[in-house]
Every structure is written in C-alpha cells, then in structure tokens.
Image (cartoon, grey):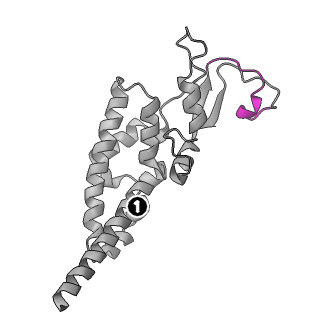
Amino acid sequence: MTSTGNYYDIDDILTDGIKLPCTFEITVPGLGFLAGHNANDAIKEGTEAELPLWLASTLSVSQITADSDKTFVSLPIPTALSQVVMNALEGDPMSVNLRDQSTHFYRFVERWLSISDLSDEMTLRMAQVTSAALQQRATSIFNHAQNPNTAVWDESGIISNLDELELGLYKIAQTATINVRKWVSSKKTT
C-alpha cells in the first residue's frame, strides 16, 4: 500500500516506485540483491543502493532498536529536490521543467516531506518554495487554459514541462472553459 493509503491510485503507485539513492547504516545479512549482489550476500554498512521510495522511506525512519536513534538507511536530498531546483523554482517557477525532475513532482515532494524533519531549515524552505511555485504555476496554467490561443502556449513546450498534477489542472480548466463558452453561447441563442 502506498504511503498515503490510496492503494488503487496509479499516481501514488508510480510515485512510490521512484528510485532513491540510499546508504545503508548497518550491515544487513541476506539482502545483497538490493545492491545488485547475490541474494545470500550481506549488504555492508556504507553500501549505496537505489531503493524505491516506499522502501527507502520506511527504512529511513525505522529505528534499528527501540532505544536507538540510528536508522537502517540514510537518504541524501534527491537531485529533483536539490537546492538548484529550489532556487530555480523560487526565481521563475514556470522556467523549471518539473516533468524532467519527476513526472509526479508534487507527490514526490509530499512524500519526501512526510519522512523529513520539518524543523530542518532546508526542509521547511522546500515546503515553502514548492507551495509558492505551485500557486504561481497554477495561476499561469489556468490563464493559458482559458485562452483560445492555447496552441501558441503549447508550441512553446510548456505543457510538456508540467508534472501530472499540473497537467490534470490544465485539462480540467480547459474543459471548464469550453463548457462555459458553450453555455454562454447557448444562452445567447435562446
């Protein structure tokens, strides 16, 4: 089941499948296959491996023992959520190709924040920057969806820069605009 509990949501499933680089903090016997080794081999402390988000997040917040603060793996901030990306989003949100970062960028940020220390300055900044970016990008998306000359916007490649959430917003806004125009047109003829 996905971390948000929506077992049948394909977008949640795809988000939870995003691979993250992890470093094992302890030696774990019999899990060598996770690091591309023989299944009977141990994963040694310090071994780096790419794990799906659902597994990496669980291992990064699970303590080895009840009286220990040490977790099974440590997770560096993923490239898609790096300071470079945050700076670009802060500077000009529409200039960032979120689809290149992750097709489910905002869900990925949501998952990352759910396993992060929210008192950490970088984590807090990430939450603020992505929230502000979504607001600014949504405004632009809605404006363009209501414009009958959307083809110009589409030709500039901006639609291909949208993540799945934004693409859904665009389609909803465009459909609503078409329906309102049809309704207004029908009222004029009656």
When the figure is inspected, residue 91 is found, relative to residue 145, above or below; the finding is: above
Other-residue count near label 1 (Cα within 10 Å), few / some / many at <14 / 14–19 / ≥20:
some
Q: Quadrant of the N terminus?
A: top right
Residue 129 is left or right of residue 39, and the answer is left
* Magenta segment includes 105: no
Q: Position of residue 68 (x, y in %)?
A: 55, 10
When the figure is inspected, residue 58 is found, relative to residue 90, above or below; the finding is: above
Report if residue 74 is visible in the image: no
Q: Residue at x 39, y 42 (%)?
A: 85
Look at mark 1 in the image and give the residue it sits on: 167
Residue 63 is left or right of residue 173, and the answer is right
Camera-nearest residue between 134 and 185: 185
Work out which residue is located at the far top of the displayed protein and give it: 67
Q: Position of residue 88 (x, y in %)?
A: 34, 45
Work out which residue is located at the far front of the displayed protein and give it: 190
Residue 84 is left or right of residue 186, and the answer is right
Q: Residue at x 19, y 91 (%)?
A: 189
Name the image quarter holding residue 166: bottom left
Residue 75 is left or right of residue 188, and the answer is right
Helix, strand or loop: magenta stretch: loop
Q: Residue at x 18, y 91 (%)?
A: 190
Name the amino acid type tagged 1: Leu
Work out which residue is located at the far bottom of the displayed protein and give it: 189
Name the image quarter holding residue 30: top right
Region in magenta: 25-38
* Magenta segment includes 34: yes
When the figure is inspected, residue 189 is found, relative to residue 158, above or below; the finding is: below
Q: Position of residue 161 (x, y in %)?
A: 41, 58
When the figure is inspected, residue 129 is found, relative to residue 10, above or below; the finding is: above
Report if residue 117 is visible in the image: yes
Q: Residue at x 29, y 37 (%)?
A: 128
